[in-house]
């Protein structure tokens, strides 16, 4: 092709057709520029496609992480709701000075617990490496940030508070005042009357129940957000 254009230029020069030569040369330059621009456009398009594919792959990994989170959140949320119901029954029993039976022993085993939660965030870390701003879907981008930067840290903070109460008050209390105790299953007081008269215990149970409710709300927000995110990713980016 280059030799073909060169022969045309040489022919025009040999025939002393300078004006036609100049016109042809300008046209040739324009064609070269157009060719370069097209090549650049194709290259940019290819790079954009690569980026879109990379983001799509990462979003599907985030979806897999969210599905794991959802399953774990649902399990823990169900347990925390049962813990709260058990704790309410224990509070009522202490307030009414009810003699503990097997059912209340089981409830007492669910009091003051913390249940650790760990979120899967490998996909989100990969998305941050790609630059979160490259995700053009603003609504999805904001919701992903809200989940990993607000909802999950809120769950972890509430869980950390539960752990602090468990380790600082409830665990030492079980060692002093319970003859038997199995985490989350049952607890037997050394002295039933002492438990029923213990105002410090009652105050702890009420305060801890309030904190447990806060933890439950954090779990519910995280679960709701994860469900929305899963639906959005599946509708737009699923493989």
Image: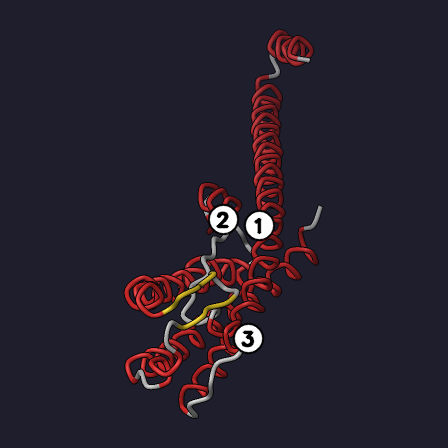
Instruction: Return the residue nearer the eye: 231 or 99.
Output: 99
Q: Are marks 1 and 2 in contact (CB under 8 Å)?
A: yes
In the displayed structure, would residue 150 be above or below residue 123?
below
Residue under pointer 1: 65
Q: Position of residue 136 (x, y in %)?
A: 54, 54
72 vs 197, nearest the viewer: 197
**Residue drawn at the location 52% of the way across and 65% of the way down:** 185
- Residue 191 found in image quarter: bottom left
The residue that disc 3 covers is 102
Q: Position of residue 153 (x, y in %)?
A: 40, 60
| Label 3 vs label 2, nearer the camera | 3
Q: Secondary structure at mark 1?
A: helix
Question: Distance of mark 3 from mark 2, alpha carbons?
Answer: 42 Å
1 or 2: tag closer to the N-terminus: 1
Query: In terms of sequence position, does the residue under pointer 3 or pointer 2 come before the other?
Result: 3
Residue that badge 2 annotates:
121
Q: Label 3 near label 1: C-beta < 8 Å?
A: no
The quarter of the picture where residue 213 lies is: bottom left
Task: Give me the C-alpha separation between circle 1 and circle 3.
Answer: 40 Å
Give the distance between the C-alpha atoms of the residues marked 1 and 2, in whole angstroms: 6 Å
Q: Rate crowding at label 1 as few (under 14), some (14 to 19) or many (20 or more) other CA atoms within 10 Å.
A: some
Q: Which quadrant of the figure contains the N terminus?
A: top right
């Amino acid at each position: 092709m280059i030799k073909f254009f060169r022969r045309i230029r040489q022919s025009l020069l040999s025939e002393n057709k300078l004006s036609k030569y100049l016109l042809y040369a300008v046209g040739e330059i324009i064609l070269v520029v157009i060719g370069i621009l097209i090549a650049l456009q194709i290259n940019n398009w290819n790079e954009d496609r690569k980026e879109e594919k990379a983001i799509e792959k990462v979003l599907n990994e985030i979806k897999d992480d969210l599905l794991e989170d959802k399953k774990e959140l649902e399990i823990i949320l169900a347990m925390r709701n049962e813990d709260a119901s058990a704790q309410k029954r224990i509070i009522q029993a202490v307030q009414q000075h009810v003699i503990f039976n097997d059912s209340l022993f089981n409830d007492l085993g669910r009091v003051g617990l913390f249940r650790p939660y760990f979120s899967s965030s490998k996909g989100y870390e990969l998305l941050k490496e790609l630059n979160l701003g490259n995700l053009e879907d603003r609504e999805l981008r904001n919701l992903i940030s809200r989940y990993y930067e607000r909802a999950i840290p809120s769950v972890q903070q509430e869980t950390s508070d539960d752990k602090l109460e468990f380790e600082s008050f409830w665990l030492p209390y079980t060692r002093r005042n319970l003859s038997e105790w199995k985490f989350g299953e049952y607890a037997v007081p050394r002295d039933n009357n002492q438990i029923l008269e213990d105002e410090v215990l009652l105050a702890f149970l009420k305060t801890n129940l309030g904190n447990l409710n806060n933890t439950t709300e954090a779990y519910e927000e995280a679960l709701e957000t994860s469900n929305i995110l899963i639906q959005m990713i599946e509708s737009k980016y699923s493989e």
